[in-house]
Image (cartoon, rainbow, N blue to C red):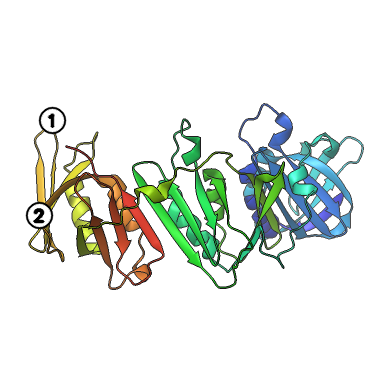
Amino acid sequence: MKFTAKLSEFSKLLQKVVPAVPPKSTLPILEHLKFDLKGNILTVVATDQDISILSSIEVGDPEEGGVLVPARMLNDIVKALDNSANFTFISDVENYEIKIITSSGNYSIKGLNPDEYIQLPELFENEKPDFSNNKFNVSFPKGVLQRLANKTSFAISTDEYRPSMNGALFQFRNNYIYTVATDSFRLVRAKSEDENYKFEEEFDVLVPLRMMEFLRKIDEEVKMSMIIGMDKITHVRVDYNHTVIVSRVIDEKFPPYESVIPSNINAIVTLDSKIFLSALKRVSLFASSFSKLVKMRFENNEVYLFAVEDSSGNFAEEKIPCEYTGEKIEVGFNWKNLEEIVANIDSNETDNNLIELQFVEPIKPVLVMPKRENPTLLSLIMPIRY
């Protein structure tokens, strides 16, 4: 096996696949990248058995073949080389010794027989999906899937004892998609609506947090498809450019979140998100490091924010304007959770940076919404009892 390539292009290829290599595995073979050269197309695969990534580039002077390459070693070497130069990659067909040759140096790595790599039927035995139908496939315009992942990933639970919350729920409906995440203290639902969706049937899939972190980095047009096994969805696949990522889905039932979204709203507070965040950050400096409690009182078109540090007695209070005409409400929040909820609302999702806090009563979940007709983002946060 032999090829030449630009280090800059090869480095980008590695950046795509290396994140799927486990740092330490009970199967040492998984700490390798699988190289396969056919014609002038080099395909590289990495997996930790939960997530598999395949990406490819065109190379020069090809001699077909395959080899398993120690991932971390190769990545470290490429990072240390001159990114603007070219290099030659040679693998001995008998002992799989790998040589990397540049204009200024030669480097040797011990590779392995590619036949020793594990089988990945969900990646290699599934043909590229036919996106002419929308049964279990969807094409996302540039940036849309990335937005759904960005808007919800921060609210995914990392509690291993709550596996049903360790991912984001994708709900595919007639002409829209919901992506939902919750850690039981807060909930976020982002929406993408497009007349081109038109799914033949409704279906849900629970995508793990780690896959969501990959999706956050893809600012491209993306094709997403579901892999079916034993009459149920077992994997989710995304295709973009010359890269494929396949992830197991979470085989758990997501909490029935619709039941906790309040409908009988009794009070609405409208305020400027930037002014509110600035005040919250200042007052939070005085909050308990344990409870992170910041108290708020809404009355007479004003919001009063309070925090006190228990051990020292240090105290902070601020007042900012709002629109509020209901009865006085006092409520407490974990300031960090609330800050992330509010900061997650971009200025282009609201009118004049305005947001709404919608209350049923002080101890019930509070809706946090961009102030806009037909908003595409809904957030929910639980108050703290005090």
Please give the label number shown on residue 243: none
Near-viewer residue (317 or 266): 266
Q: Residue furthest top?
A: 26
- Which quarter shows the C terminus? top left
- Estimate the x, y position of residue 31 in percent, counting from the top left: 69, 35
Separation of residues labelled 1 and 2 (CA atoms): 29 Å
Q: Regarding mark 2 in the picture, which secondary structure is present there?
A: loop
Mark 1 lies on residue: 311
The x, y position of residue 269, in whole percent, is 20, 61
Residue 2 appears in the rendering:
yes
Mark 1: give few (<14), some (14-19) or many (20+) Cα within 10 Å.
Answer: few
188 and 273: which is toward the camera: 188
Is residue 141 placed above or below 250 in the rendered structure? Answer: below
Query: Which tag, 1 or 2, sits closer to the chain's start?
Result: 1
The tag on residue 328 is 2
Q: Amino acid at mark 2?
A: Lys
* Front residue of this view, candidates 118 and 360: 360
Q: Residue at x 51, y 49 (%)?
A: 169
Relative to 343, is 108 above or below? above
Q: Amino acid at mark 1?
A: Ser
Label 1 with label 2: CB-CB less than 8 Å: no
157 with respect to 87 (left or right): left
